[in-house]
Image (cartoon, rainbow, N blue to C red):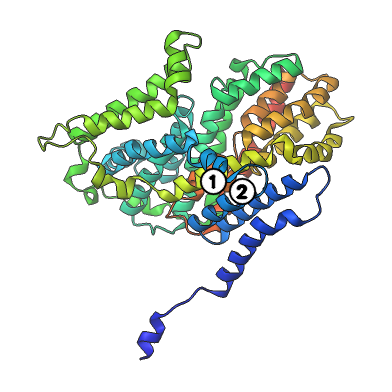
Amino acid sequence: MSTALEKKKGYSVSYIINSVITIVLMFGFGFLPPIGDITPVGMKVLGVFLGLVYGYSACDIIWPSLMAVLAYGLCGYTTMADAITSMMGHNVVFQTLVGFISAGALTYYGFGKWFVRKTLSMKIFKGRPMFYVCSFFVIFGLSSIVVNQIVLSIMLYGIWLDIAENCGYEKNSNFVYVGFCGILFATMLGGAMVPYTSWQYGLAQVWAEIAGSPINFGIMGCITVPCTALSMIVYVYLSKAIFHVDYSKMKEFDAEKLGEDSKTLRPRTKRILIVFVISVVVVILANTMIGSSFANFINNDLTAAGVYCLCAAILLLMPSGEGDGKGCIEFDKVKETAISWQVIFMCAVTLPIATAVTNESTGIVDFLSGLFSPIFAGHGGLFILIVTICLSLFLTNLGSNIAFGSAMIPIIAPFVIESGMNPMFAGAAMLFIINIGAVLPGASAPAAIFHSQAVLTNGAMRIKVTLVGCLALLIVSIPLFVIFSMIF
């Protein structure tokens, strides 16, 4: 009798309280008197955003997402139909979905185990786990300048889980949290080193128009490439000291634990890798050969999401090469492990709401402008540069990096010009740092994917490791940008 009663468990008091707070924020915050320049509609949008972030951190992923859809559709900023369309029809959501199929299949068919065996068995890493971890983040971080960071991070999360499992780490260990956050920061920093594509390039053009000085991508790369590498190294050592990560288990890694099938790549895995790499190269070339008919077709007609869609379709059709009469990807087999609906829902809901937070009609940007503009008045160039870095990192972790980047340019540029400093350094710092939205789920698409990983169940720990990542970035970026601004 007592055993039967013990099996019946209800929600904890804390879960009920957190759920109530989430719902009250979403549906009740907007009825508070407007703060500063924030409009009544802006208060409702802000409430939905705050409730969403709180719900993701303290409760769950799926039901707060659904509640946010309802609250967003009823807040007066948009209609319910348009809210659903903007969420489920977002190109990043579709790109994430089709990216899951290809990247997830690579892990499912043994690429992760092969990669772990290949790298951890190399003599240069034998008995040097810290060197291996630093190299892992630095290499993949630098490669993100040409590889789509969302698709790459999804693949690397699977690889890191393979490393953890085969080295004897628990799934909820600090090793996993620190590793996932390292992947998030490495790919985000790498993708931000040179703003030669998409909205980043657009912000660079806006800065050139307002500041009257274009950003030299070569000089920017000279700063951001070492900044990315050094930030990841500092992050590894900081996180080890703060979270007491035990890397000694990696010394005892036994490649034989991975089995005979990890020694070589299966034929279908090779084909998946080849088609996937070709897809990445196509996207890179399209963003390099700007103005060509090829680039216009890929970027404007097919789009990057379309390229990865074609990639997945080809792999589902292409014979595996293993004589089993199947395609390279067997969707029924990989769908359970390759596609995370938590990620899909989080991306779908957070991206439109985070953008709405910084829309002109909400008044939130005007409120922030009035709040932060006085900080820059009457100060020298170095002070403005340092505050730009800190402010960019703070704001990008509140909401859409695209929107906040656009809002910051007209605020910062006039004071930079007045200070007499070379405007390109403040512009380069802002463009680099504004990408690194990681602490909150709604800060960026990569952050939404990170925070929705099923293995990362501790919301507080997710925030802690991302804050350490931000600290490492500040420690490295401030002196580097200051030194280069003084040299040039």
Q: Position of residue 170 (x, y in %)?
A: 39, 59
Q: Nearer the viewer, residue 334 or 322?
A: 334
The quadrant of the rendering that contains the C terminus is: top right
Q: Is residue 192 visible?
A: yes
Amino acid residing under circle 2: Tyr
Residue at point 44% right, 32% down? 139
Residue at which label 2 appears: 72
Q: Give the label, 2 or 1, closer to the camera.
A: 2
Task: Give the Cα distance between marks 2 and 1.
Answer: 9 Å
2 and 1 marks in contact (CB < 8 Å)? yes
* For marks 2 and 1 on the same chain, the one whose residue lies earlier in the sequence: 2
Q: Quadrant of residue 405?
A: top right
**Left of 396 or right of it: where is 444?**
left
Q: Position of residue 47 (x, y in %)?
A: 68, 52
Circle 2 residues within 10 Å: few <14, some 14–19, many ≥20: many
**Left of 340 or right of it: where is 484?**
right
Q: Position of residue 443 (x, y in %)?
A: 60, 42
Circle 1 residues within 10 Å: few <14, some 14–19, many ≥20: many
Residue at which label 1 appears: 349
